[in-house]
Image (cartoon, grey):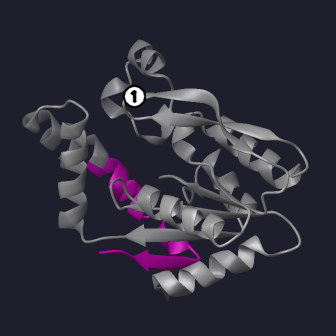
Amino acid sequence: MLTLDPATAYDRAVDLATRQRRSILGITGAPAAGKSTYAEQLTAKLIADGHKAALVPMDGYHLAQSALEELGLAAVKGAPHTFDGYGFVALLRRLKETPNEQIWAPRFDRGLEDSIAASIGVAPEVTLIVTEGNYLLFDEMPWATIRTLVDQCWYVEVPEQLRHERLEARHRRYGRSPEEAHERTYGSDERNARLIAATSRSADAIIQLD
């Protein structure tokens, strides 16, 4: 498996952004691996350097908290079946196949624990879409379709202890008690992490972050 350092990864992203057609770069990894932060930083650097890039995360397709509670799925929020996977795939297809349109995507607000529709605008001049999320390489439908829509998909790795520490801290930051944060980190989140880790072999490259 190819391992990329940040500088080489950036050069690859520039290559995708300067092709004659719109490209999509996927960033995936387990919860709290740092994929969201990395994707944000990568997109910001591309834009600062004059490239037309946009970040469209998968998390905008979380089912609404009210829907999760109604379905009895709130305790496993973050599992594959707690997302509108078909909606996310449809968005990626539209971004790839109709680049001449102004497209609006939803954004997930962690403070609200819900998505806000039509929050991210993607203009026709954008040549690189960076998307990040847990299940970009998952081999069950509808997620398996994503691999046919992204030009490259990179898997982000960090040491497991650091990832667990980050995840517990995140849960506490958004209102969970230390006990609830620990239970969530080593319970449903860990089950999801193992599911995601099994998809890493399908990545085009690994990015190891500290």
Q: Quadrant of the C terminus?
A: bottom left
Where, by quadrant of the figure, is residue 51 drawn? Answer: bottom right
Image position of 90 (left or right of 102): left
Q: Exactly how many numbered labels are in the figure?
A: 1
Q: Is residue 170 left or right of residue 53?
A: left
Residue at 34% in and 55% down: 193
The location of residue 11, given as percent across then percent down, is 62, 84
Residue sitting at x 51%, y 85%: 7
Residue 73 visible in this rendered orientation of the protein: yes
Residue 202 falls inside the magenta stretch: yes
Above or below: residue 134 compared with residue 62: below
Q: Position of residue 137 (x, y in %)?
A: 56, 60
Residue 179 horizontal side relative to residue 25, left or right:
left
Q: Residue 66, percent across and down?
A: 44, 15
Q: Which residues are magenta?
A: 190-210
Whether residue 141 is visible to the viewer of this picture, yes or no, is no
Answer above or below: position of 69 versus 208.
above
Tag 1 residue: 113
Please state which amino acid type lies under the numbered disc 1.
Answer: Glu
Residue sitting nearer the eye, 73 or 63:
63
Categorize mark 1 by other alpha carbons within 10 Å: few (<14), some (14-19), many (20+).
Answer: few
Q: Nearer the viewer, residue 66 or 173?
A: 173
Answer above or below: position of 120 versus 9.
above
Secondary structure category for the residue under label 1: loop
Q: Magenta stretch: residue 18 in it? A: no
Q: Nearer the viewer, residue 161 or 81?
A: 161
Residue lying furthest left in this view?
179
Residue at 51% across, 41% down: 59
Quadrant in which residue 151 is drawn: bottom right
Residue in the picture at 55% in, 72% down: 203
